[in-house]
Image (spheres, coloured by chain):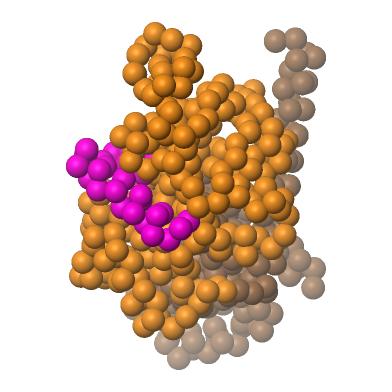
């Protein structure tokens, strides 16, 4: 391959990537705008709340409790190298609330919810159910996307809060049962150390990750190709994109909260 | 009532419609025939606005179909999709009454359910089907539910996309008869796309043969067998010999 054609391929790839970003951004703007414009579909919103929020609780809880427990063990082992074992409650609390809670919940939502939204909408597309919605005077963005994005915006921060609490509880259980920490002192240290902005940053990250997860699921579902392969590609692509965007957004938001 | 003028539509370098012209008078049943991949579904979706034509004009009642109030425009149409396109997550009655449960035609749930059950009866299904999910129904029953949904809001114009595909000959006959009866009874304008000649004879007032992106022949169904058009003759006979290439 000549240098010119190599440069051409590189340019084409960059242009395609920028075009994809543009399409996703326009889709996201459209989706968010439909949240505020009637008609509204409360039944679909209720179902989305249940699917995204309530039914995600078990996986979020289990992920958080094991992570909190492992984090306590790691901090204890690491801290022991310079006689700082006592910082376990503070580091578990800050690690879970500011970083691990939102990120792990975000990734779990990407795995569980984004994939499910993408597969469901993509299947609707290949079986002409989306076309059927249009012929029945129902806007697919209002009926399918807006309720899911709004539900994710509301429920994922709540899931993050639950994940933070359960993660801290996991660290507390390991620290008090295995590492000899005093339960009352552990709780006092945790509460004293956490600041309001730690909790705010956790919830803001949760809201952002929820919107990313729902929008990527809807976008990939709506732009799915034909047949089973199209549905498979849409599902895989949605989870990959959501996970990468959640991690990138986490980096950006962490930077923003650091600078405040 | 429906007029397509010089409609073009291409997907990349695949020029599906290349200047399609068609007139469907009010209250008549037009059946478009043609081989697979000739653009029958694309033509239908262009009228509904599900696909935007590259050029050309589509008029419904003399008005540009791409302008004006979209909800009001779509409220005039009912459509039976090839695979029925029922919403998996909703029970049968909510599929049938979908339009009656939301939007401008919204009415109380009890009333909508009554109408749905009445429409299900009209297509030969019992009331006990109403609470089942689409996945629990056979292909023929799904088509009937799709037909009930298409007529639930009593539209002026009904589109049927391959209504008998995938059904056995007996069920195909039942669906064809239902379509003919319903269209006549409602006085609706109908457009059906199919390559099933038994459907054509059962449903059509007029027939149009689509090939090469244009209407090759159109006329009353009674004149179809003596049309003298080589495309129509080959299509009716199902012969591999003729102007339509067997390998496409």
Q: Is residue A138 above or below residue A241?
A: below
Residues in magenta? Answer: B162-188
Q: Quadrant of residue A10?
A: top right
For this rendering, which residue is in front, B201 or A63?
B201
- State which quarter of the image contains the C terminus of chain A: bottom right
Residue ID at (56%, 46%): B25
| Secondary structure that dominates the magenta span | helix
Regarding residue A28, the answer to whether it shows in the image is yes
Is residue B88 highlighted in magenta? Answer: no
Residue A108 in the image: state x and y as whole percent: 46, 60
Q: Is residue A37 left or right of residue B190?
A: right
Residue ID at (33%, 77%): B114
Residue ID at (39%, 81%): B111
Residue B217 in the image: state x and y as whole percent: 53, 25
Q: Is residue A123 above or below residue A32?
A: above
Chain coloured orange: B
Q: Is residue A132 above or below residue A175?
A: above
Residue ID at (66%, 83%): A195
For this rendering, which residue is in front, B142 or A30?
B142
Q: Quadrant of residue A229?
A: top left
Q: Is residue B15 above or below residue A234?
A: above
Residue A98 in the image: state x and y as whole percent: 61, 70
Chain coloured brown: A
Q: Is residue B85 left or right of residue A13?
A: left
Is residue B173 highlighted in magenta? Answer: yes
| Circle count | 0
Residue B235 in the image: state x and y as whole percent: 40, 21
- State which quarter of the image contains the N terminus of chain A: top right
Q: Is residue B64 left or right of residue B27?
A: right
């Amino acid at each position: 391959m000549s240098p010119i054609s190599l440069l051409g391929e590189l340019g084409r790839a960059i242009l395609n990537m920028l075009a994809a970003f543009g399409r996703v951004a326009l889709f996201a703007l459209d989706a968010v705008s439909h949240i505020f414009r009637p008609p509204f579909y409360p039944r679909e919103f209720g179902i989305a709340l249940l699917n995204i929020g309530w039914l995600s609780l078990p996986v979020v809880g289990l992920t958080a409790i094991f992570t909190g427990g492992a984090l306590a063990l790691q901090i204890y082992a690491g801290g022991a190298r310079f006689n700082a074992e006592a910082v376990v409650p503070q580091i578990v609390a800050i690690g879970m609330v500011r970083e691990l809670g939102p990120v792990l919940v975000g990734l779990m939502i990407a795995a569980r919810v984004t994939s499910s939204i993408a597969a469901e909408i993509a299947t609707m597309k290949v079986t002409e159910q989306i076309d059927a919605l249009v012929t029945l005077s129902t806007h697919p963005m209002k009926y399918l996307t807006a309720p899911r994005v709004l539900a994710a915006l509301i429920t994922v921060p709540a899931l993050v809060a639950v994940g933070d609490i359960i993660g801290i509880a996991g660290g507390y259980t390991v620290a008090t049962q295995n590492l000899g920490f005093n339960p009352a002192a552990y709780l006092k240290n945790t509460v004293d150390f956490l600041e309001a902005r730690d909790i705010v940053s956790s919830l803001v990250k949760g809201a952002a990750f929820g919107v990313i997860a729902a929008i990527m699921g809807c976008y990939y579902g709506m732009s799915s190709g034909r047949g089973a392969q199209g549905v498979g590609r849409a599902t895989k692509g949605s989870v990959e994109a959501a996970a990468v965007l959640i991690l990138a957004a986490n980096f950006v938001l962490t930077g923003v909260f650091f600078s405040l | 009532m429906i007029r397509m003028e010089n409609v073009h539509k291409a997907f990349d370098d695949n020029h599906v419609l290349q200047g399609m012209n068609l007139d469907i008078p009010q209250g008549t049943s037009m059946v478009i025939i043609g081989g697979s991949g000739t653009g029958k579904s694309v033509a239908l979706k262009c009228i509904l606005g599900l696909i935007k034509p590259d050029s050309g004009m589509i008029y419904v009642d003399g008005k540009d179909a791409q302008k004006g109030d979209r909800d009001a425009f779509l409220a005039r149409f009912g459509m039976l999709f090839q695979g029925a396109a029922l919403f998996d997550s909703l029970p049968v009655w909510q599929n049938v009454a979908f339009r009656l449960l939301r939007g401008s035609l919204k009415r109380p749930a009890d009333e909508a359910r009554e109408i749905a059950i009445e429409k299900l009866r009209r297509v030969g299904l019992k009331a006990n089907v109403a609470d089942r999910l689409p996945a629990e129904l056979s292909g023929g029953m799904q088509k009937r539910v799709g037909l009930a949904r298409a007529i639930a809001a009593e539209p002026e114009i009904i589109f049927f996309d391959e209504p008998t595909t995938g059904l056995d000959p007996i069920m195909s006959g039942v669906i064809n008869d239902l379509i003919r009866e319903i269209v006549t009874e409602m006085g609706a304008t109908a457009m059906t796309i199919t390559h099933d000649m038994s459907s054509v004879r059962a449903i059509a007032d007029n027939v149009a043969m689509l090939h090469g992106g244009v209407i090759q022949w159109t006329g009353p169904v009674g004149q179809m067998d003596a049309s003298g058009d080589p495309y129509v003759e080959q299509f009716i006979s199902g012969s591999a010999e003729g102007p339509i290439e067997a390998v496409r």
